[in-house]
């Protein structure tokens, strides 16, 4: 392991631990009424996942010199939107999945109605956090952050991507249609993570913002391509969620559309695009570079 | 019909028509992709209901001299939260209802998965609207509006009330527990409507804000008591939703807790409290007074 890689691993562990503590503090405590709802919200969010979106918030924040105390709130808001989408996505009327992050899904643990409400309330909490903490020097910029996250979560963002996914199940999609789906389903929120992270710091110029945007788009798509490869390639134990379910559910994936070898090439090419996008930002973008590597080269 | 009553009816009709047009404009058009999701969002929101929450936004806005162009956006945001909650509440895993506002419920018309996503996306859109239009002179005040709506919708507001409702079904609750449930389930969003309406205008003093808050709490509870009375008293045709379903589903109501005669007395007493709360505001509160009368004396 190279020195920079060891350093990146340490940074990642630090951000992940910080986020776990922040989310635990920002979520309502499990004994506060309605206790079962709050327990379900915590179950859906805590001890879960690689925290890729929060890592992107922190990495983009370094480009803009943002304070960690602000980044932690913005990252929590993005992660709550992500957690709500997983809780709803796993429901019987959607993907009907029973395993997530190595644990029973929220509705298996708490029942469908509570899982539905927990997802709903996690979404509300995300916007509450963005509004009630001071995250930008200019309150207009902070309102812009609320708008960015809302648009990324909504019908022309993540929820729209889920709808396209729903309608595509059982059909075969070409690569352009797959890309359209994933730009919405996964890409929109990953892009929001990068934008919100940089918005917590010094105002960037248009050219710098455009670089971050190109980075975010490439990384967002790469994330999904690698997800498709892992779903077909890795085991349930490694993933902590049901492996091979895309194929069984008849979902079109990059692997089904282009085969695993070309999907690997595509992920590698997107990694190249992400790195090229932020090259001009210099050392400030070091974490973004390492994260693009991590996202594409991960094994889980 | 008295002159003031005719005037109130005309005002109500005007606000309702204005809101229908505003919501139709602010919702994504049905031909925009993903078209089925957007159609479901429009179906869940348009041509529906009495628009009690938007009416409260406009009536409270008059107290603070707010511009109608701002009130219409704030009212749309509140109404989108209400529409999303109905779409989710009607789902099979919640109340499992097939009729709402005289039409098949969203999941009956579009399927469960699309109804779920439409509700999710309506919630996102509500916050997007509050962030992307200029609604207050001071952007800090506008961030406060986002916080108010998010808190009202979340686990310590409306979604929390739904959870309490869920857990209370099949049990009998005393009046204090019923009140706790409804302060969350219906009251929080009605209170947010009043607060958001007044926030669109001139900054009010603390004493005036406290009056509006007392009004909103009394009206919010009165609204629910009257709902319970109508559910047991009116026909499905009059209500446009399934009548008598509270009793059939074993839901505790004010009627089951105290009998219909005492529930009527309670509604009347809450109307008195609402009127007393805004008495000191003078003519500016005229619409709030008429609305309290309308909410308690309505037959549907």
Image: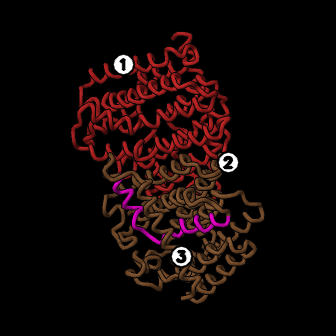
Chain colours: A red, B brown
Whole-percent x, y for residue B26 in the image: 44, 53
| Quadrant in the picture for residue A187 | top left
The residue nearer to you, when weighing B131 against B231, is B131
Instruction: Kindly identify which residue carries mark 3.
Output: B252
The numbered mark 3 sits on a residue in which chain? B
Whole-percent x, y for residue B299 in the image: 49, 83
The residue nearer to you, when weighing B168 against B226, is B226
In 3D space, how far apart are the residues under numbered discs 3 and 1 (Cα atoms)? 59 Å
Q: Is residue A57 left or right of residue B246?
A: right
In 3D space, how far apart are the residues under numbered discs 2 and 3 (Cα atoms)? 43 Å
Q: Residue at x 47, y 63 (%)?
A: B19
Whole-percent x, y for residue B13 in the image: 48, 73
Q: Which residues are magenta?
A: B38-63
Q: Main secondary structure of the magenta part?
A: helix
| Membership of A160 in magenta stretch | no
Q: Secondary structure at mark 2?
A: loop
Q: Residue at x 41, y 65 (%)?
A: B90
The circle on residue B138 is 2
Whole-percent x, y for residue A253 in the image: 29, 34
Instruction: Kindly identify which residue carries mark 1.
Output: A268
Residue density around tag 3, few if under 14, some if 14–19, many if 20 or more, within 10 Å: many
Q: Are marks 1 and 2 on the same chain?
A: no
Q: Residue at x 60, y 43 (%)?
A: A130
The circle on residue B233 is none
Q: Nearer the viewer, mark 2 or mark 3?
A: 2
């Amino acid at each position: 392991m190279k020195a920079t890689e060891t350093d990146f691993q340490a940074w990642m562990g630090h951000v992940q631990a910080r986020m776990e503590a922040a989310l635990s503090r920002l979520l309502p405590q499990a004994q506060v009424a309605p206790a079962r709802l709050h327990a379900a919200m915590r179950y859906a969010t805590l001890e879960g996942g690689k925290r890729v979106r929060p890592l992107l918030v922190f990495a983009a924040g370094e480009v803009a010199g943002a304070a960690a105390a602000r980044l932690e709130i913005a990252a929590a808001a993005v992660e709550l939107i992500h957690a709500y989408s997983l809780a709803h996505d796993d429901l019987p009327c959607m993907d009907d999945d029973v395993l997530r992050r190595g644990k029973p899904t929220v509705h298996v643990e708490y029942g469908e109605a509570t899982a539905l409400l927990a997802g709903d309330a996690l979404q509300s909490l995300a916007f509450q956090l963005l509004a009630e903490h001071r995250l930008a020097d200019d309150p207009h910029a902070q309102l812009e952050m609320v708008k960015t996250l809302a648009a990324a979560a909504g019908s022309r963002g993540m929820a729209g991507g889920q709808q396209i996914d729903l309608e595509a199940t059982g059909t075969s999609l070409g690569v352009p249609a797959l890309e359209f789906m994933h730009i919405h389903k996964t890409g929109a929120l990953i892009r929001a993570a990068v934008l919100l992270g940089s918005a917590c710091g010094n105002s960037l110029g248009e050219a710098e913002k455009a670089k971050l945007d190109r980075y975010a788009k490439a990384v967002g798509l790469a994330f999904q391509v690698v997800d498709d490869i892992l779903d077909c390639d890795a085991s349930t134990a490694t993933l902590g969620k049901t492996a091979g379910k895309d194929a069984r559910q008849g979902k079109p994936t990059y692997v089904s559309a282009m085969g695993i070898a070309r999907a690997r090439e595509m992920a590698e090419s997107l990694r190249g695009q992400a790195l090229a996008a932020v090259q001009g930002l210099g050392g400030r973008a070091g974490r973004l570079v390492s994260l693009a590597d991590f996202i594409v080269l991960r094994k889980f």
